[in-house]
Amino acid sequence: MSAWPLHPENDALALDLVDPPPGRSLVDLVDPFVTLGRGTFSRTLLGALEGPRGKLVREVAITLQSDEYPLLSEEAAITCDAIDRGWSRKVALLEETAERTLRGPALVEVFGREAGEPALLPPTLFCKQRRAFFRSVCPT
């Protein structure tokens, strides 16, 4: 687990790290996080909400914007607008499912957000060597 301390509303969120194969370190891996699935515009990682003493409160699946997008074709290049529309559809689906589902996974809001809008995280980098998150320099 690696705590994600850079979001002011929830410093108890942690992402699970992959166990590197024998003889390799986390630095050798392309993706250091336990990935549960990938969509066109997203990826879902295994994580946890931790209590004040670092004890597990609840395991969670965290859906984040993907860091890579497939090139469908030269004519159908993915645009920022297409990504925003995709996220809006995903948020609407999650909200609708959470409202009518009594069994199965529950939608747990770990970040503040407006209804119908995705939560926004600050630009963040992860250092595999130190196993720590750092706020990225961003002009906006």
Image (cartoon, rainbow, N blue to C red):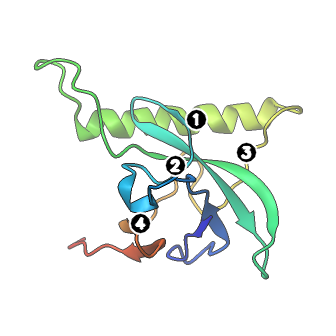
Q: Residue 108 has which mark?
A: none
Residue carrying label 1: 92
Distance Cα–Cα, label 1 vs label 3: 12 Å
Residue carrying label 2: 21
Foreground disc of the pair 1, 3: 3
Foreground disc of the pair 3, 4: 4
Q: Amino acid at mark 3?
A: Leu
Distance Cα–Cα, label 3 vs label 4: 29 Å
In the rendered structure, which disc, 2 or 1, sits on the residue that comes first in sequence? 2
The residue carrying pointer 4 sits among few (fewer than 14), some (14 to 19) or many (20 or more) residues within 10 Å by Cα, namely some
Q: Position of residue 70 (x, y in %)?
A: 28, 28
- Furthest-front residue in this view: 23
Residue carrying label 3: 107
Relative to 67, residue 125 above or below:
below
Disc 3 on helix, strand or loop? loop
Q: Position of residue 55 (x, y in %)?
A: 80, 72
Q: Residue 128 has which mark?
A: 4
Could one spot residue 131 in this view of the protein? yes
